[in-house]
Amino acid sequence: MRIVLFTGKGGVGKTTVAAATAVRAAAAGSRTLIMSTDPAHSLADSFDMPLGARATPIADRLWGEQIDAQERLEANWRDIQEFVIAFMNWAGVDAVEAEELSVIPGLDEIFSLTDVKHHVDSGAYDLLIIDAAPTAETLRLLSLPEVMNWYIERIFPVERRVVKTIRPLLSRLTSMPIADDRIFAAVERLHRNLDGVRQLLTNERMSSVRLVVNPEKMVIAEARRTYTYLSLFGYRVDAIVANRIIPPEVEDPYFGKWKDIQAEHLETIKESFEPVPILTARLFDREMVGVELLAAMGVEVYGELDPMAILHLDEPMRVHKRGASYVLSLRLPFTERADLNVFRRADELFIRVGSYKRNLALPQTLQRLDVQDASFVDDRLEVRFARETGGRATAAAGMRTEGGPDG
């Protein structure tokens, strides 16, 4: 099965490009499901037909789904939410307020990702297209499984043992609700689902991301940042789709300056993302709504290319031997040294780029070694590991990247 996720700054035409890709793939014979995880669903508008919270037939070999985030929230969060509400009620919080406060903002969007694993496991489709939310929300969705994985593997088992030990004592001393095995099982089930999604979306032979941009300065800047953060978490971008380009046949003097500006921005896009393929779509003279017009747009974007194909295969992270040392290399394009912070703590390497942080569990080969230095080589962060005759002082003290602060 193949998974392609579309994202981009709000308003760039992300949903239209995703829908056009789905129509073209289905016309080529692939059983295709396009699903929207964007809370502001516009997928049904793009096809000009109603779509449900479950797979709805659109055309031959094509189905669409606009996920009901509230329904997914209740299915995945209800047991945990009931405990949180009970605890807040015990603490004196009004019942209605407790109900509202028990849901973390954005949590409903995160649970929509669990449908990805369900559809892959079903085997009912050849291609799953995800029309994701605008970039900031998408990055939050894609980084959560990694963050939750760290918590579940390191903190959660300790909390569970502690609660199990003190529950008999606390139950005699206080009426405060205490999490039981049912709550912990719900958390573990949620973790398994989200971690399963993460493994699917970072599978280089199955999944890739396509960034949709317009030839505009702010849009390109956000796309560059998004590309960096996606690389940080191991998601592979296999194409950039430059949308709404004024076609050559438009010769009205009013658009002359716009065409010149777009030409400059297109050159910036090519220089920025090379060697990732740049696909283009012209600015049409009408709204591309409905299967017929979306099919025409699919031809415009892909030409003779197979929309299901992996258009570019990147390697965000690798470890290789260099002399007596090992080098962990992570691709971080467009990263300023001042925005980067790297430090070692025990058997983990923490990497922060801007407001996003990833912790890497080091392979056993590197766990036995000490960090010697870190530097940039082209667009890759390289962290060198080797044996330190004086013990593991480097690992304990952290490290400094060139131009970066201490961890």
Image: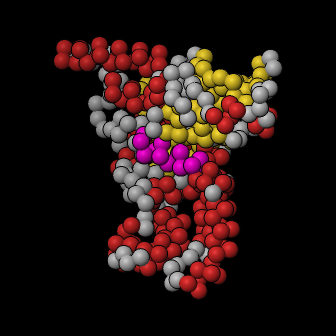
Residue depicted at x 50% and y 33%: 353
Please state, as top left, top right, bottom left or bottom right, where the N terminus lies in the image.
Answer: top right
Magenta region: which residues?
135-147
Residue 265's place in the image compared with 18, above or below, is: above
x, y percent for residue 302: 50, 28
- Which is nearer the eye, 307 or 95? 95
| Left or right: 86 as drawn, with respect to 369 | left
User: Image height check: is 160 above or below 294?
Assistant: below
Picture coordinates of residue 321, whole percent (x, y): 78, 22
The x and y percentages for residue 184 are 62, 69
Q: Quadrant of residue 398?
A: top right
Q: Residue at x 54, y 73 (%)?
A: 79
Q: Residue furthest left?
A: 254
Left or right: 5 with respect to 1?
left
Residue 221 shows in the view:
yes
Q: Is residue 72 above or below residue 126?
A: below
Residue plotted at (44% across, 79% down): 90
